[in-house]
Image: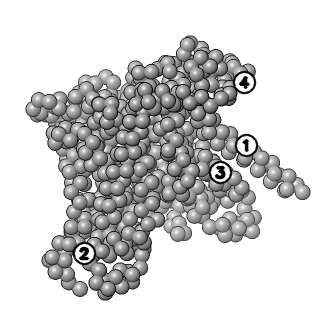
């Protein structure tokens, strides 16, 4: 009886602790969505601490149409999908070769990719920006290429370790049936590493969607900006328009949150994968 | 099995696109950083070799550089202690509590998933105290009858600490997930055996959890230092530097590059990079010493 009571008390204490931290994570976002449905006058009187009485979509309309957030949104989707497509294609080809095929210098090149992940480069964006400037690539192409490079090392590492664990029998069978290496990679290799590709896709999509530094350096024209840069511009222009800023923030956060709730396993794997390498 | 030259060429061609992009956007810029740091370059006219002038400017000339390193170190200190201890306690809790396990994991990890800009701008709105003494958080405190706590959260006296805490708030979910993964690799039998031998909760923690988790703890410490010293987008969105009070090193690099001082920005990056490599090597040796002290751990 005594132990039972002690256990219950510990559990209550533990849950209170965990719940209060969980609330601190959720409440600011509840407030954010709540404010995004309010008019500025209503916000000024209650600071968004009362639940919005009606779903007022006016802020969203203003932000999306008049403030051109639909364009930022489209740009973000464009950069993210192109970059992720390139990374998956290039890194799965390279990972397959590193894992299965042989050529001189293979280990040295793989080691270079590994080292690249471990060196801290706090100003890594400076020389890349200068380079893009010299190559006249301060545009969409330059951004996509630079972002592709940022995701390559970890993606190659993840996919290679996954390829290493697969049995070779299927590939041998495909070879006997007359497939060349490219066909084996496409028809046998890629379907087998689909789970790892999902992780690589999520990890890189998140990276590009949330990227700010390069995007803010490269895109000074507002019709090229992705969401993160658009948000910064917008918030410095509209300092007092709290409700509009909250609607803009909601628009930026919503796709990531929805995707996260749907595929949280891949998110956690992708974001902790970098740690496991070290 | 020897493969022919054309075979090896095909094999290499699989790696070629990756190697090409990697060479142009990583290997070349990596060495280019060092060259640029000895030059004065405004991105328009020809770069000019200036020797060690940039480094002299960073290390002794620029009065704002070392304070910005201090600010970074200040935030890193809070991330190392507050953020990681909180994450560790949460992970211990979630590891023991089975019910609600998934709920907590999903909720805690949502902050690392969102971008630094979103977190920064959202907290800026929540914490702002304009007009003076008002603002969302203060109003809320008044409603909870805690009006005495209301203050200017992003004002001169507090902005550094508040920035550090917001950084911890965004980052603890990440440390939590890694701690939790580490805790769940510890086999339950060890605890059972210890309990049969009469060990209490504290002894179990001290003799099993802590030593077995040492590699994970060392890893998190190194990654926290590297990550926090290089973070700046959240702070840019939250305070914009607050007149130097929350300016961190990479923010200076970024602003110098925007101001077309590419050479100076590179020199700052090199100085910070050397500091970070030195710190992570020290950490690596310390954690090796700790591992030796605890002896060979069962794998």
Label 2 vs label 3: CA separation?
Answer: 46 Å
**Badge 4: residue crowd in 10 Å (few <14, some 14–19, many ≥20):** few
Residue A140 placed where, x, y %?
27, 42
Q: In this view, does B64 lie above or below B130?
A: below
Q: Can residue B175 be seen in this view?
A: no
Q: In this view, does B219 lie above or below A76?
A: below
* Chain identifier of the residue bearing label 3 in the image: B
Q: What element carries label 4?
A: loop
* Figure quadrant of residue A98: bottom left
Label 3 vs label 1: CA separation?
Answer: 14 Å
Q: Is residue A11 visible?
A: yes
Residue under circle 1? A16
- The tag earlier along the polypeptide, 2 or 1, is 1
Residue under circle 3? B103
In the shown orientation, is residue A249 left or right of residue B26? right
Residues marked 2 and 1, same chain:
yes
Label 2 vs label 1: CA separation?
Answer: 57 Å
**Badge 2: residue crowd in 10 Å (few <14, some 14–19, many ≥20):** some
Residue under circle 4? B144
Identify the residue shown where x is 33% and y is 24%.
Answer: B64
**Badge 1: residue crowd in 10 Å (few <14, some 14–19, many ≥20):** few
Q: Check the image and name the residue furthest to the top.
A: B132
* Chain identifier of the residue bearing label 1 in the image: A
Residue A102: give its label: 2
Foreground pick, B197 / B79: B79
Mark 1 vs mark 4: give the one in front.
4
Mark 2 vs mark 3: give the one in front.
3
Foreground pick, A168 / B287: A168
**Badge 3: residue crowd in 10 Å (few <14, some 14–19, many ≥20):** few
């Amino acid at each position: 009886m005594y132990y039972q009571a002690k256990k219950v008390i510990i559990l209550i204490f533990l849950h209170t602790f965990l719940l209060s931290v969980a609330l601190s994570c959720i409440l600011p976002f509840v407030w954010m969505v709540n404010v995004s449905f309010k008019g500025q006058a209503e916000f000024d009187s209650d600071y968004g601490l009362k639940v919005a009485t009606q779903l007022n979509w006016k802020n969203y309309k203003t932000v999306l149409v008049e403030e051109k957030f639909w364009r930022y949104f489209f740009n973000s989707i464009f950069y993210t999908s192109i970059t992720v497509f390139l990374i998956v294609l290039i890194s799965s080809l390279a990972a397959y070769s590193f894992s299965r095929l042989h050529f001189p210098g293979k280990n040295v090149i793989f080691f270079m990719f590994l080292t690249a992940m471990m060196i801290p480069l706090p100003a890594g964006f400076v020389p890349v920006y200068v380079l893009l400037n010299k190559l006249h690539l301060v545009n969409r192409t330059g951004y996509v290429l630079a972002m592709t490079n940022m995701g390559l090392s970890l993606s190659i590492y993840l996919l290679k370790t996954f390829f290493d664990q697969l049995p070779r029998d299927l590939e041998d069978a495909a070879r006997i049936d007359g497939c060349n290496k490219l066909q084996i990679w496409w028809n046998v290799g890629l379907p087998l590493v689909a789970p790892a590709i999902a992780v690589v896709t999520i990890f890189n999509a998140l990276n590009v969607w949330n990227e700010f530094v390069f995007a803010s350096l490269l895109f000074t024209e507002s019709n090229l900006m992705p969401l993160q840069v658009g948000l910064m511009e917008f918030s410095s222009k509209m300092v007092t328009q709290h409700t509009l800023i909250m609607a803009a923030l909601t628009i930026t956060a919503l796709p990531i949150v929805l995707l996260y709730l749907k595929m949280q396993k891949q998110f956690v794997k992708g974001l902790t994968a970098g740690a496991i390498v070290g | 099995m020897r493969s022919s030259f054309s075979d090896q060429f095909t094999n290499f061609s699989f790696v070629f696109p990756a190697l090409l992009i990697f060479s142009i956007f990583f290997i070349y810029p990596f060495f280019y950083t060092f060259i640029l740091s000895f030059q004065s370059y405004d991105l328009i006219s020809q770069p000019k070799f200036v020797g060690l002038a940039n480094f002299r400017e960073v290390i002794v000339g620029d009065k704002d550089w070392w304070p910005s390193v201090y600010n970074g170190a200040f935030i890193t200190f809070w991330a190392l202690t507050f953020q990681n201890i909180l994450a560790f306690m949460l992970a211990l809790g979630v590891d023991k509590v089975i019910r609600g396990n998934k709920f907590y994991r999903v909720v805690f990890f949502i902050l690392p998933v969102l971008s630094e800009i979103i977190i920064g701008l959202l907290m800026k709105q929540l914490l702002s105290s304009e007009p003076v003494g008002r603002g969302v958080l203060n109003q809320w405190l008044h409603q909870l009858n805690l009006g005495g706590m209301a203050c200017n959260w992003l004002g001169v006296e507090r902005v550094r600490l508040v920035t550090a805490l917001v950084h911890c708030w965004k980052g603890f979910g990440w440390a939590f997930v890694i701690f939790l993964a580490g805790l769940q690799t510890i086999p339950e039998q060890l605890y059972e055996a210890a309990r049969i031998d009469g060990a209490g909760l504290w002894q179990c923690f001290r003799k099993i959890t802590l030593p077995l988790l040492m590699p994970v703890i060392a890893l998190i410490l190194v990654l926290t230092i590297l990550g926090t010293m290089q973070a700046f987008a959240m702070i840019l969105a939250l305070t914009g530097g607050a007149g130097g009070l929350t300016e961190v090193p990479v923010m200076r690099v970024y602003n110098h590059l925007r101001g077309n001082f590419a050479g100076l920005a590179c020199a700052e990056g090199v100085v910070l990079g050397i500091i970070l490599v030195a710190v992570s090597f020290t950490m690596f040796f310390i954690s090796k010493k700790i591992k030796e002290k605890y002896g060979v751990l069962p794998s």
